[in-house]
Amino acid sequence: MKNYYLLSLVILISVSLKAQNKPTKLQDTTALGEIIINSTRINLPFKENSRTISIISSEAIKKSATNNIADLLQQVAGIDIRRRGAAGSQADLYIRGGSFDQTLLLIDGIKMDDAQTGHHTMNAALPIDVIERIEIIKGPAARVFGQNAFNGAINIVTKKELKNTISATTETGSFGQLNAGITVGAQLENSSHIVHVDKMTSAGYRHNTDYDNSNYFVKSIFNKKKQAIEMITTFQERKFGANGFYARESATEQYEETQNSLMAFSTQFNTENLTITPRIYWKRNQDEYLYIRNNPPAYRNLHITNKIGAEVNANYASKVGITGFGIDLAKVYMNSNNLGDRNRFMTTLFLEHEFKLLNDKLDITPGIAVTYFSDFDFYAFPGMDLGYKLSDQFKAYGNIGYTYRIPTYTDLYYNDPNTIGNPDLEVEEAFAQEIGIKYFSPEFSASLAIYNRDAQNLIDFIRPSINETVYTATNITEVNTKGFEFDASYNFKLSEFNQTLAIGYNFMEDDILKQNKDLSRYSLNTLKHHFTTRLSTQLFKNISQNIIYKHAERSTGDSYNVWDASIALNLNQVEFSITASNIFNADYIEAGFVPMPPSNVLFGLRYNFN
């Protein structure tokens, strides 16, 4: 009965506190539609793009009943976050199937790919307190971002600046969870600064699932009165027990520590028709894995990857349209006691142009990215977007594109008693197509997309027969993936307060199972049906509540339903919150052999020093 008590607690508090307050304005979705998408070189408002792009605003993040990005992205249909445990300590990111190596994560447009493995993608995820919005690009995005955007990309846009303020947060709850954080914003005469520090800890919801996670973030803008220079610095550290995370279910004493850091500097030069944005950056990832937590010599892996990059992106407006172009140079160094010492140099040239015809109703954007890899030669990623404005609210669109992914160092060189890399692997290739239609208004927005992807040489770890225990990295044969997705959001008034109902559904199927049944290590868990809904309501003074429902059915036949909810009481400078997760105690697994946490509660307190 514990699960019903959790839901009852949220409902009882929401109906027991009642008072009066001035109603807030209806969410300004018109302003949302005018947001310039930062993750593209051709600067276009959100509603004018001819791709499947979703935005999670800072307001939606606040109402998500989550405290980390991994849990937040699970609420987006078509995105499969396969978590191992709680608080986003370890999670793999998928968009429309594929693998965790085929989705690119960016921070303010900076590529956070890791040459060791895409398994570390979510290590770079930022604390939600510093995020302005999240831009989600589904479908092939290689012509815009390069080779790791095989199935899509996610760009985390950080807050530009905060007024002089200090905000402190503390949370405690089930499984010995104890979280604390502080965010400081400072506006000076010629500079602005955002500083955030937090720590999230737990004793774990079962044996050896404890964690100790830390986040550090600094963003500064210098020389604001002249040529502004922006600096961003991040550091994330994860320390967690990894009971059954990898290897086999009986491996209950595994342990892992990861570190991910970024430092970047950028500026922007503007004329009437030309915008140029240069950037330099350094990204570092460290991964230490112990097979037996209290006996490191038994088996230990240590991988350290450094990436140093410089890029220049630009767009030019002329009578014949907008041209986006750029160059990205990067050098990767890796030191590993398992994968060896490796390095790779990459150069990518980008070019695309948007044509507008028929009184600006028709837009056509062809483009290409050409990349040189020092160890895999040259590859080109051509593609094209096409859109037609049926009215001010309706737009039909379609896009096609080729995409590639070179193997990671784990694919090529990893070696343990049960896993063997393959230095002779070929590059993954795919040709993807998509058509869709979207509607946008202040009260209601919706989109429908149908997609298809024909891939070959996809990389998976395969064993030759069910009698074998050793998996070898292998290029599997052709794989077709197809599906459709629908998203809608309705904003309305009730009792003079804002209410929002958002739903999403994604259906996807592929023929991987027909080729690798019982032989594949990673490709057997496709999210076939994915339905999400969020109801955000406010009925009383300063009290808001949110209910999140997620249904998932995987290609293996496993299905589950998860309910989350939150309630917040805002009293000027103080905010109290209660978040209930997995209310009805669903028993399910997202990745490997790791059962997800049972029903749990988190109590929060935030204080704003004005």
Image: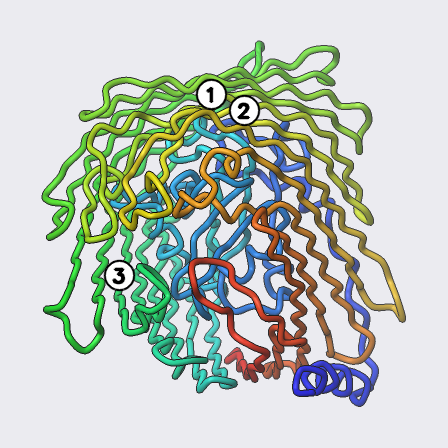
Residue drawn at (44%, 45%), measured in percent from left and top? 518
Check the image and report above or below for 478 versus 29: above
**What residue is pinned by disc 2?**
432
Residue drawn at (37%, 24%), measured in percent from left and top? 326
Give the residue furthest to the bottom: 16
Q: CA gap, disc 2 to disc 3?
A: 34 Å
Of the numbered discs in the image, which one, if any, rests on residue 402?
1
Where does the image place residue 568, in percent across and percent down from the top left? 66, 78
Q: Is 173 in front, or is 249? A: 249
Contact between labelled residues 2 and 1, with CB atoms less than 8 Å apart: yes
SS class, disc 1? strand
Of circles 2 and 3, which is in front? 2
Q: Residues within 10 Å of mark 2 (few under 14, many from 20)?
A: many
Which of the marked residues, 3 or 1, is nearer the chain's N terminus? 3
Q: Is 156 in front, or is 481? A: 481
User: Left or right: where does residue 1 sit relative to residue 25?
Assistant: left
**What residue is pinned by disc 3?**
259
Q: Residues within 10 Å of mark 3 (few under 14, many from 20)?
A: many
Q: Is 608 in front, or is 350? A: 350
Amino acid marked by disc 2:
Ala
SS class, disc 3? strand
Check the image and report above or below for 253 versus 6: above
Amino acid marked by disc 3:
Gln
Give the residue furthest to the right: 495
Which quarter of the figure is the N terminus placed in? bottom right
Amino acid marked by disc 1:
Tyr
